[in-house]
Image: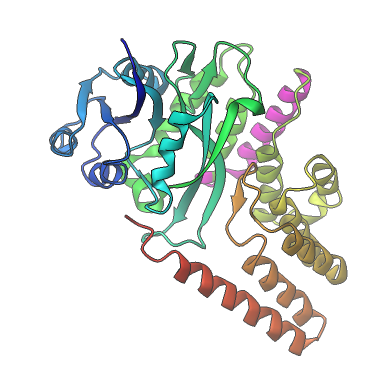
């Protein structure tokens, strides 16, 4: 299919998303040149709402592969560039017009910041994490998705950092709020699909991580840790550096299960691999705090403040380089009997938390 020389196509997949799809489409209306929704079997008002918003709806019989569904949408896109979203996402109104800057770029991929909300509704900034993701790409036959779940854009040729443009755009993702996960039985669905992939010989160790992440989400910490260790070994066996996400979840599991002695000092090895990862520094401080090593813990938390939380090449918890670090500094000072210092730290944490929440009021489009 021919493409428009300066067109931007939204491509998304949906099934029974009547509660959120209008917010998603409205967040990019007027920014994209066309909206394509691949419906995989809705029996609610999803299709009617999408069409009323001006989207073209393509029906696709669900075959168990998110990648196949996404690729069907791309095959109908006429724009030179593609933006892909999920129905439970919205593009922040601030800077969203800069999405169109890719149309004048010589790059191949466009990176934006994705904020993932978790916990109880309504979504609040302090229960979120953020990471940079490629959500825009040239509409080229060599750029297609692969993997049935946790699908990844796989270029049929080598791309480097020089081929990526970073845009000051934020995408808000609400799909892992507790009520949505429960109502859609996401964990059950994801576990079934990921376990199937993990039975395949020579599968990508990323899927061992994804299995561990889902098991963590449902509270199966022991099996989750086994999966993370399997993933680390799998990456190393392929002469690939295990991604920072694996170490983040590994030490979070140690903290959740209270195995602080097992986590220390091994977390230092992970920090040597990723010295710029603020979440690992935060976990180091929490581990030391619970081992009653208060002074080293304070140093770790001050290191968090130095790093900040702007490096979203790693999955970064909101507050890890600001109000969370100050809160734990206050906890350390309290344990040391330094009550004035503790109160100052708690006050700083509260101020930063309040500023964070107030600065993002109205983010739910």
Q: Would you say residue 198 is visible in this rendering?
A: yes
Residue 93 position, x and y percent, is 37, 52
Which quarter of the picture shows residue 337?
bottom right
Residue at 76 percent across and 85 percent down: it is: 341
Residue 289 position, x and y percent, is 78, 66
Whether residue 346 is situated above or below residue 105 in the rendered picture = below
Residue 220 position, x and y percent, is 56, 43
Which quarter of the picture shows residue 68?
top left
Q: Is residue 9 left or right of residue 194?
A: left
Q: Would you say residue 173 is visible in this rendering?
A: no
Whether residue 8 is situated above or below residue 288 in the rendered picture = above
Region of the chain picked out in magenta, as a range: 217-237
The C terminus sits in image quarter: bottom left
Q: Residue furthest bottom?
A: 340
Comparing 332 with 321, the one in front is 321
Residue 21 position, x and y percent, is 26, 41
Whether residue 300 is situated above or below residue 143 in the rendered picture = below
Residue at 69 percent across and 34 percent down: it is: 243
Whether residue 218 is situated above or below residue 243 in the rendered picture = below
Q: Which secondary structure type mostly characterizes the magenta part of the structure?
A: helix
């Amino acid at each position: 299919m021919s493409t428009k020389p300066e067109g931007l196509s939204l491509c998304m997949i949906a099934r029974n998303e009547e509660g959120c799809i209008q917010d998603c489409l409205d967040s990019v209306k007027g920014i994209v040149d066309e909206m394509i929704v691949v419906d995989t079997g809705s029996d609610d008002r999803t299709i009617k709402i999408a069409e009323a918003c001006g989207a073209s709806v393509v029906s696709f019989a669900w075959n168990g592969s998110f990648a196949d569904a996404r690729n069907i949408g791309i095959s109908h896109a006429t724009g030179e560039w593609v933006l892909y979203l999920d129905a439970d996402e919205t593009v922040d109104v601030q800077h969203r017009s800069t999405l169109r800057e890719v149309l004048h770029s010589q790059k191949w991929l466009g990176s934006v910041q994705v904020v993932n909300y978790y916990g109880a509704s309504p979504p609040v900034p302090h229960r979120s994490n953020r990471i940079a993701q490629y959500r825009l790409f040239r509409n080229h036959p060599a750029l297609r998705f692969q993997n049935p779940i946790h699908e990844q854009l796989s270029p049929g040729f080598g791309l480097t950092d020089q081929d990526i443009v970073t845009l000051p755009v934020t995408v808000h993702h609400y799909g892992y709020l507790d009520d949505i996960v429960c109502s859609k039985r996401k964990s059950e669905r994801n576990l079934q699909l990921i376990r199937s992939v993990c039975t395949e010989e020579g599968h990508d160790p990323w899927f061992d991580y994804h299995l561990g992440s889902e098991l963590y989400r449902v509270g199966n910490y022991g099996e989750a840790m086994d999966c993370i260790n399997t993933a680390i070994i799998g990456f190393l066996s392929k002469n690939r550096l295990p991604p920072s996400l694996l170490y983040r979840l590994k030490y979070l599991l140690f903290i959740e299960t209270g195995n602080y002695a097992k986590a220390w000092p091994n977390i230092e090895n992970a920090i040597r691999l990723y010295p710029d990862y603020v979440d690992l520094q935060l976990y180091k401080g929490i581990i030391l705090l619970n081992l009653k090593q208060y002074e080293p813990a304070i140093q770790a938390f001050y290191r968090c403040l130095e790093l900040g939380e702007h490096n979203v090449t790693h999955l970064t918890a909101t507050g890890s380089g600001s109000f969370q670090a100050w809160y734990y500094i206050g906890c350390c000072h309290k344990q040391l009997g330094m009550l004035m210092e503790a109160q100052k730290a708690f006050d700083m944490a509260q101020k930063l938390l309040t500023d964070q929440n107030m600065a993002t009021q109205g983010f739910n489009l």
